[in-house]
Image (cartoon, rainbow, N blue to C red):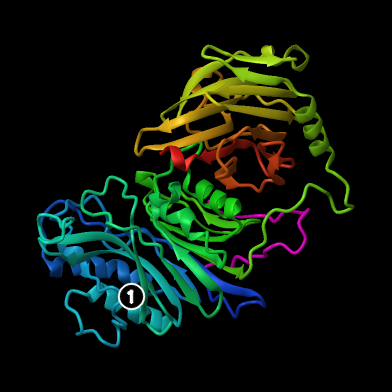
Amino acid sequence: MSGARAPLALVLGGCCLAALGAGAAGPPQAGHFVAAVYEHHAVLSPDPRAPSSRAQALELMSQNLDIYEQQGVQIIVFPEDGIHGFNFTRTSIYPFLDFMPSPQLVRWNPCLEPHRFSDTEVLQRLSCMAIKGEMFLVANLGTKQPCHSSDPGCPDDGRYQFNTNVVFSNNGTLVDRYRKHNLYFEAAFDAPLKVDHIVFDTPFAGKFGIFTCFDILFFDPAVRLLRDSEVRHIVYPTAWMNQLPLLAAIQIQSAFAVAFGINFLAANIHHPSLGMTGSGIHTPLESFWHHDMESPRGHLIIAQVAKHPLGLTGTENAAGEMDPSHSKFLEVMAGGPHCEKDAQEVHCEGATSWNMDASPTFHSEMMYDNFTLVPVWGKEGHLRVCASELCCNLLYQRPTLSRELYALGAFDGPHTVHGTYYIQVCALVKCGGLGFDTCGQEVTEASGMFEFHLWGNFSTSYIFPLLLTSGMTLDTPDQLGWENDHYFLSKSGLSSGLVTAALYGRWYERD
């Protein structure tokens, strides 16, 4: 489905996006720029591991470029692997690679100077698109760079092969390129020996940062880029396979925008049979997104985006009074039990008054990690569950009870499947059924409504708020932030039944 997440009522002067569909965007509003992301259903090689010629490779890539050429705005982002496809070997992808000169060393307009370098047909086509559309253009392609045996990192075949994002200005000049650092089972490509930290400037919105797909889960380059306070926007080509309940494409895209207070322009490839869908233009306050597991067609999202994004603010209402639910949350924190964990179990002073023993603790696998969970029963309550150094709390009310099982889970440790990285997670999830062993399964539909505060004693400051409701719909937290050394998320008035509410912490130093 496609959708728009509404702005927070309690925030004044919030970023305003207008979804404009696939037609003409019109001139930008004052203080805004017009952006687009295209979720592309790529034409793929029928046998990506089989040898092919450069001519055959160009013929296939031209079919995808023909579709790209139909779009146009001030800046557009196309997805990872959208031109050449995926599942190649290092050898079979070679005919699909363009030669890539360094934009730091060479100023080049491929459309106007097509004969300057050989094997640059794709770059030429993209450059001409940027000129024709009078737009900045961000696309992903495979590139090659010869190297010498004197280079200690040079592969045995004498060339580097990179998963590369390119940026063209509206006059077709190659502005910059980013070579993907955190590869995700991509045997055809090399990681650059030094991480690219690429920031490019635009006349209409200032500075943009750029990275690709799996990079979003790591400090370099994603987080380090944002240490430049002038970077307010990220462009993000991706080929993301959705994994619920915590890492659907639109979930992590929106969470990144909210966590860092930036605009996030994400273009995913569209192949529902592989679980690949989910693109969006996300701001800290609202999102326009597309997630469709049924249609085989691509989808264009266009929006007016504020040049200076505003983040979540305050815990007071319009009258300047503290939100009553937040006051209760503060009371709970101030009077709650003090807990310490030894080798066997968590001991809480004053636990009886909080009725924390009413819900049994159990374990279940979520996203290949062994979560410790407690069931969420009844119309209201305060629950706590701990894992290693992390203790997660939930203060909740439910207007009505549904015949569904929800659970509060905690995980604190290294994630080791499909990548290795350290996470701390507090998650309220709808279970796949009524049994404890179904908690952590992939779910997309739910009817359970909640008003809640979710918080934990995180050891990292890098925490991504995930809020997903029924039908793969994004929702916005009411409040986020630190309170008494705990990070919290609060929400009331969900748009539909809750699928996942989570605080996804990345402890980069422990990777």
Query: Percent x, y for residue 447?
Result: 64, 33
Label the magenta part by its dominant secondary structure.
Answer: loop
Which residue lies at the image location 15% right of the left edge and 51% below the top edge?
A: 49
In the depicted view, which residue is nearer to us: 217 or 136? Answer: 217
Percent position of residue 82, x then y: 33, 61
- From this view, report whether residue 288 is shown above or below residue 440: below
Q: Residue 50, position in %: x, y?
A: 12, 53
Q: Amino acid at mark 1?
A: Gln
Residue 296 in view in this figure: no
Residue drawn 36% across and 51% down? 271
Q: Which residue is mark 1?
A: 104
Residue 13 lies in the magenta-colored region: yes
Q: Magenta region: which residues?
A: 1-21
Is the C terminus in the top left, top right, bottom left or bottom right quadrant? top left
State which quadrant residue 98 falls in: bottom left
Please check the rendered image and state whether residue 383 is part of the magenta-colored stretch, yes or no: no
